[in-house]
Image: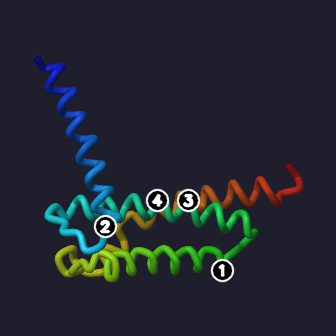
Amino acid sequence: MSIKNKSMDSANKGKTVESIWKKAFVANTEWPDKEEFLDVIYWMRQAIGIVLGLFWGLLPMKGFLGLLLFVIVNAAVIYFYVNNFQNIDEEEYGGMWEITKEGFMTSFAGFLVTWIIVYTGLYNESL
């Protein structure tokens, strides 16, 4: 009987994750569970970090300009998503600064690793 409960729990979890992502791509969605919305912000940031790392590596962008542009683009995308697409009252989440910090450092790490690998692989002649 415990095996049935475990399989039902994993099936419900899959449906929950699927419904969270459906809500994430629908404008003006209500988020009764604040943690779900913050999870969406976290994972969106991870995707943004990797995509920007690929672009920066392909462009061949270097130095402080690449870092600064990453911070600006990453923060701007999240800001517009929260304020214009979802119309969230940021005070419910501790202010815009708290939303902006959510998952930023891990996104930055993913961005750096991706950027360095792509850039080095394409433009380093000593390999």
Q: Nearer the viewer, mark 1 or mark 3?
A: 3
Q: Which residue lies most toward the left here?
A: 1
Other-residue count near label 4 (Cα within 10 Å), few / some / many at <14 / 14–19 / ≥20: many
Residue indicated by mark 3: 50
- Distance from label 4 to label 3 (Cα)? 6 Å
- Percent from the top left, x then y, of residue 112? 60, 61
Decide which of tag 1 and tag 2 comes sooner along the chain.
2
Q: Which mark is first along the chain, 4 or 2?
A: 2
Q: Which of the two marks, 2 or 3, is nearer to us in this view? A: 2
Circles 1 and 2: CB distance less than 8 Å? Answer: no
Give how far across and how far down residue 109 sits, in percent: 52, 60
Mark 1–mark 3 distance (CA, rounded to whole Å): 17 Å
Q: Is residue 10 left or right of residue 102?
A: left
Q: Residue at x 19, y 64 (%)?
A: 34
Residue named by callout 2: 26
Q: CA distance from mark 2 to mark 3?
A: 23 Å
Q: Are marks 4 and 1 in contact (CB under 8 Å)?
A: no
Which of pointers 2 and 4 indicates the residue nearer the eye? Answer: 2
Horizontal and vertical percent position of residue 60: 75, 69
Answer yes or no: do the residues labelled 2 and 3 have beta carbons within 8 Å? no
Q: Secondary structure at mark 4?
A: helix
Q: Residue furthest top?
A: 1
Q: Residue at x 25, y 74 (%)?
A: 28
C-beta proximity under 8 Å, tags 1 and 3: no
Residue topped by disc 1:
65
Mark 4, residue position: 46
In this rendering, position of residue 59 left or right of residue 99: right
**Callout 4–callout 3 Cβ contact below 8 Å:** yes
Residue type, numbered disc 1? Leu
Give the answer, above or below, for where 83 lies relative to 99: below
Q: CA distance from mark 4 to mark 1?
A: 20 Å
